[in-house]
Amino acid sequence: MTTLPAGSDSNGADPKTPQQSTGARNLLAGAAADDRVAKRAVEEPGNGSRAKSDGRARPGLETIGSFRFWFADQRWEWSDQVTRLHGYAPGTVEPTTELLLAHKHPDDRATVAETLATAVRTGEPFCSRHRIIDLAGRVHHVLVVGDRLHDSTGATVGTTGYYVDLTGRLNENRQEVLKETLPEVVAAREVIEQAKGILMFVYGVDAEQAFGVLQWRSQETNTKLRDLAAKLVAAVVASGGGPVRQRTQFDHLLLTVHERPDSI
């Protein structure tokens, strides 16, 4: 199984994608073998592949399923719905990073690999809309929402979330599905971004460093990251703002920032 993100560049990296991170390039290189396996399974369903389709067509089936992924041992867990979404009968396939990427549409695969590599590197939540190709060759438009997976100490050990099959549902029904599955993740991400912004302003650090501070305090205090962020934001609002000198400086910045060069 491919390890991500790897510590060194892959010799098999695609020369056409020089802007991809090392982790994403290694993911794509590792997906090549399972890509060929998936294609053979579609073209030759009787070839004895361990992962076999259940043979039932599900045109227009609304699918919402869950997944979990542990960073340390690169272990995936798919719900029955996600397994069926990829065209397999539950219990007939062992999900891997390589197999997951092999089922992504070729035009979306590099972007998904980059998103996954970033999630592993930073531990941040993610949201991705892309296409997958199931075992029978059908294309599904999916929304994948990933949140942090914590252990008993509150440390981030992986990602957990949902697949939402949007195929044929790009209407009011889709909006209802999104309203049911996204609010908690979106709200958590919003308050974490607000807390990051506070730290960036106060300490003069970048977004990644600010997130590192929040993550450190979360682990040190055994407090869930979203709860810690919410308390920080609430406390800052309740404090009534910064000192007068700081407010005066910020007033000037707010009123003149439009005049600054775009490069700043």
Image (tube, rainbow, N blue to C red):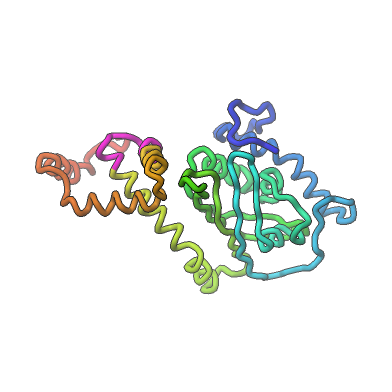
For residue 111, which quarter of the picture?
top right
User: Residue 239 appears at what percent x and percent y?
Assistant: 18, 50
Residue at 60%, 52% (x, y): give it. Answer: 68
Query: Residue lying furthest bottom in this view?
Result: 172
| Residue 123 within the segment the image draws in magenta | no
Q: Is residue 15 above or below residue 103?
A: above
- Which picture quadrant has residue 113? top right
Q: Nearer the viewer, residue 256 or 52?
A: 52
* Numbered circles on residues, count: 0
- Seen from the viewer's position, the closer of residues 33 and 262 is 33
Snapshot quadrant of residue 78: bottom right
176 horizontally vs 251: left or right: right
Is residue 218 rendered to the left or right of residue 10? left
Task: Report the span colored magenta.
Answer: 199-211
Quadrant holding the C terminus: top left
**Residue in the picture at 48% in, 62% down:** 182
223 relative to 55, above or below:
above
At which x and y percent is residue 1?
Answer: 70, 38
Q: Residue at x 68, y 26 (%)?
A: 11
Dominant secondary structure, magenta: helix
Query: Residue extending furthest left?
Result: 244
Task: Measuring from the top left, give residue 121's x and y in whole percent.
Answer: 52, 37
The residue lying toward the viewer, choosing from 152 and 188, is 152
Give the side of residue 209 with respect to residue 92, left or right: left
Drawn side of residue 222 relative to residue 29, left or right: left
Up-down relation of residue 115 to residue 181 (above or below): above
Q: Position of residue 191 (x, y in %)?
A: 35, 53
Q: What residue do we see at 70% from left, 58% from top?
A: 83
